[in-house]
Image (cartoon, coloured by chain):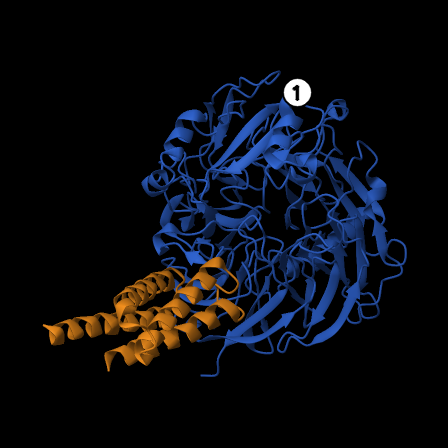
Chain colours: A orange, B blue
């Protein structure tokens, strides 16, 4: 349940980052920072997508979680300095949900 | 007869010169006193958060320099007069817009050459307006200048050229460019109109030559374009060896005193003065010129033997102050070097102490700088001259100590440390401090509001023998891209120059923030009421912290309701500040840095603020062609 929430939030982040980077008069449109945030959100979404759909082999699931978490948190940091509050919130939710998902999965294993 | 004509002009000018009761925004600075004070009573701290975008227009007159056209720089202040909003564009067109919808009433194209003849970019700061008081064609006129030195006059109602002005509405100002004419008289700043006299300053090509056209102020008849007088600022005996000391910025005027106050720039070349050791008293000065004759009534030189390009950057602001129970007609000049000079505008006498202090000597070949310079500690300068900003530890760490090393390498012994071959820190930077946007003042209280850039540059003199090789080594393709790389030749002098901001190789400023501030001063006492960081710095899209502020280009406007309206910052925002505290009340994102002074006016009962949003690569690489108007939403 938590991974789909993380994916949904990251997907929303892609939309928000895309809007910030590509739409006019956002203050960061067309800037390297705007595109970097978009790439980060897309990266997190792709990794989470592979995790949620089960398309990823079990041996790389841990690595995908790390990549998704890193992409989400770095995109949130970028969003903070880009003054994109909605993007910051989306990526923070994605990151927190992913972390909780990982912790919960670990407890179940234990 | 001449004096009768002048008195009639004075009467006509009185309405234009007054501020609080003036519903129009008829000049670059709002009024002839350059107060930038608008009687917009609804723009109060309580209501301004309800400011909404009324309309926006894209003019199409923009270039980022990637195509055939040079880059554009647009710093126009819209003019609101005759019930219409008038703008000049960097393609040297006039647009007449409906103030409440932005719909185009008419446009006029000067068909000027779109070449960067004197400036690195196509540049325009707007238009001027004149009216005779009579009815009929061309009794109201809009004037726009071009980079190739023509002044166009068109009918304010229709945009049709005024045939009686110059030749069919076009005055070739360059016909008066007769001496050392290495560049044309570029008319980028709109002229100043006082009564029936048009006062024209011009821009040249900075940092390129040693011998240039000598700066002057041209007065022409508003109806015919006939030259009335021409006042020069370089002593005749020095004209063969130097030049400029021109007026590239806006002016102010006191019609009652019959004086126009002009900000005179530095002589050429800008960063070495061995060719001009004899005094040039009017260079880098504020000069009061008699409007009827062109005679210099008084002048105040605020930099002696300028080798820092600390031009007088803006129109002096005229305001009446209280001193010892008396009302004194004063003049306030903000400067690139951060001093605020407050003078009696009748005589030029300082109203606060101005002290000549010893400054460091030069070690440049043939140079002999002035042993002293004027310092004014009251009001508190907008720049802290006591010490250069410290090295920013974060930038120093990320650059592996480059900033600390630079601090040891380059020369700085206080304000007015002369340019040197080893490299000299310019603090403040050559653009100031305070630049052409100037200040705004409340004529009711004598409180002044001003934005300031806190930027450090490095200037290095390069011996002539090494100049070409250094440019080649730095650019790879020689002089073609020298200016973009920060190299300028100062042809005819022993030195070319390299000028750059003090940054790390990653682009981080090496000096501690803030990078820009906003401050208020009580001019009656000289006390600084507050100073706060202003705007947001931005690099690659990422914003700096609020406490860092932003360098600024452009000026503020104060409303009678107690709100300051200002763009100017590098973060593509226009803002409303609480005049009492400097705190931000409202902001909006626009298409580029709004490097302009807004127009604030009342049209059909509604208060408006309108910005031209054009950008300037001095702040960051982003240009636009946006005109954006705001008014309060329906309650």
Which residue occupies the foreground of this view, B118 or B302?
A: B118
Image coords of residue B355 (percent x, y): 46, 28
Using the image, determine if residue B371 lies above or below residue B497. Answer: above
Q: Look at 85% across and 55% down and name the residue there.
A: B170
Answer with the quarter of the image where residue B380 lies.
top left
Residue B472 located left or right of residue B199: left
Answer yes or no: is residue B507 visible. Answer: yes
- For the image, the number of numbered tags is 1
Q: Look at 37% across and 52% down and name the residue there.
A: B532
Chain letter belonging to callout 1: B
Image coords of residue B177 (percent x, y): 81, 38
Image coords of residue B489 (percent x, y): 67, 30
Residue furthest left in the image: A110
Image coords of residue B527 (percent x, y): 37, 45
- Secondary structure beneath disc 1? helix
Residue B331 located left or right of residue A85: right
Query: Which residue in the protein does label 1 denote?
Result: B465
Which residue occupies the foreground of this view, B515 or B180?
A: B515
Residue B118 located left or right of residue A85: right
Quadrant location of the C terminus of chain B in the rendered image: bottom left
Which residue occupies the foreground of this view, A109 or B445?
A: A109
Using the image, determine if residue A104 lies above or below residue B300. Answer: below
Q: Look at 45% across and 59% down and name the residue there.
A: A33
Residue B505 located left or right of residue B188: left
How many residues crowd mark 1 within 10 Å: few (<14), some (14–19), many (20+)?
A: few
Answer yes or no: is residue B24 visible. Answer: no
């Amino acid at each position: 349940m938590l991974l789909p929430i993380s994916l949904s939030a990251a997907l929303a982040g892609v939309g928000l980052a895309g809007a910030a980077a590509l739409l006019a008069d956002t203050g960061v449109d067309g800037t390297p920072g705007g595109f970097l945030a978009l790439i980060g959100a897309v990266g997190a979404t792709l990794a989470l997508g592979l995790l949620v759909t089960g398309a990823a082999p079990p041996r790389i699931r841990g690595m995908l979680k790390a990549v998704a978490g890193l992409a989400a948190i770095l995109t949130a940091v970028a969003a903070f300095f880009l003054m994109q509050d909605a993007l910051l919130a989306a990526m923070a939710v994605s990151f927190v949900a992913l972390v909780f998902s990982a912790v919960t999965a670990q407890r179940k294993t234990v | 007869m001449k004096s009768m004509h002048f008195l009639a002009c004075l009467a006509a000018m009185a309405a234009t010169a007054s501020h609080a009761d003036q519903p129009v925004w008829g000049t670059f600075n709002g009024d002839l006193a350059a107060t930038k004070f608008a009687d917009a009573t609804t723009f109060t701290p309580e209501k301004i958060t309800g400011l909404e975008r009324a309309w926006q227009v894209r003019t199409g007159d923009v270039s980022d320099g990637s195509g055939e056209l040079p880059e554009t720089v647009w710093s126009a202040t819209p003019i609101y007069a005759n019930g219409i909003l008038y703008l000049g564009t960097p393609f040297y067109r006039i647009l007449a817009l409906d103030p409440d919808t932005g719909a185009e009433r008419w446009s006029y194209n000067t068909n000027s050459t779109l070449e960067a003849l004197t400036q690195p970019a196509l540049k325009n700061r707007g238009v001027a307006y004149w009216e005779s008081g009579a009815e009929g064609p061309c009794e109201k006129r809009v004037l726009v200048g071009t980079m190739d030195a023509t002044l166009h006059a068109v009918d304010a109602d229709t945009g049709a050229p005024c045939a009686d002005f110059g030749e069919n509405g076009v005055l070739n100002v360059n016909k008066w460019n007769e001496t050392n004419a290495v560049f044309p008289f570029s008319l980028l700043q709109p002229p100043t109109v006082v009564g029936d006299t048009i006062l024209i300053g011009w821009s040249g090509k900075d940092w390129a030559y040693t011998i240039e056209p000598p700066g002057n102020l041209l007065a022409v008849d508003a109806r015919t374009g006939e030259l009335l007088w021409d006042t020069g600022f370089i002593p005749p005996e020095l004209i063969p060896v130097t030049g400029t000391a021109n007026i590239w910025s806006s002016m102010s005027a006191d019609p009652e005193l019959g004086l126009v106050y002009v900000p005179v720039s530095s002589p050429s070349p800008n960063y070495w003065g061995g060719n001009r050791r004899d005094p040039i008293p009017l260079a880098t000065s504020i000069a009061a010129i008699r409007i009827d004759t062109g005679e210099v009534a008084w002048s105040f030189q605020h930099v002696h033997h300028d080798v820092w390009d600390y031009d007088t950057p803006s129109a002096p602001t005229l305001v009446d102050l209280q001193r010892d129970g008396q009302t004194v007609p004063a003049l306030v000049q903000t400067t690139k070097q951060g001093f605020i000079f407050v003078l009696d505008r009748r005589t030029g006498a300082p109203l606060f102490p101005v002290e000549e202090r010893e400054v460091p000597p030069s070690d440049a070949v043939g140079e002999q700088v002035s042993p002293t310079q004027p310092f004014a500690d009251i009001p508190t300068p907008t720049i802290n001259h006591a010490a250069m900003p410290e090295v920013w530890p974060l930038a120093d760490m990320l650059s592996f100590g480059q900033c600390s090393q630079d601090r040891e390498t380059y020369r700085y012994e206080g304000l007015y440390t002369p340019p040197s071959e080893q490299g000299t820190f310019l603090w403040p930077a050559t653009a100031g401090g305070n630049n052409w946007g100037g200040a705004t003042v409340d004529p009711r209280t004598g409180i002044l509001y001003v934005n300031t850039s806190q930027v450090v540059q490095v200037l290095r003199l390069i011996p002539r023998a090494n100049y070409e090789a250094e440019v080649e080594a730095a650019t790879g393709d020689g002089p073609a891209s020298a200016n973009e790389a920060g190299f300028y030749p100062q042809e005819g002098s022993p030195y070319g120059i390299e000028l750059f901001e003090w940054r790390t190789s990653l682009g981080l400023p090496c000096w501690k923030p803030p990078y820009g501030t906003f401050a208020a001063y009580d001019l009656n006492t000289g006390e600084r009421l507050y100073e706060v960081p202003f705007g947001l710095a931005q690099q690659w899209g990422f914003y700096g912290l609020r406490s860092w502020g932003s360098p600024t280009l452009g000026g503020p406007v104060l409303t009678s309701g107690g709100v300051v309206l200002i763009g100017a910052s590098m973060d593509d925002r226009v803002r409303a500040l609480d005049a009492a505290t400097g705190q931000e009340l409202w902001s909006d994102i626009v298409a580029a840095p709004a490097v302009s002074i807004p127009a604030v006016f009342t049209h059909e009962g509604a208060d408006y603020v309108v910005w031209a949003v054009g950008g300037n690569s001095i702040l960051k690489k982003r240009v636009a062609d946006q005109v954006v108007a705001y008014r309060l939403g329906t309650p």
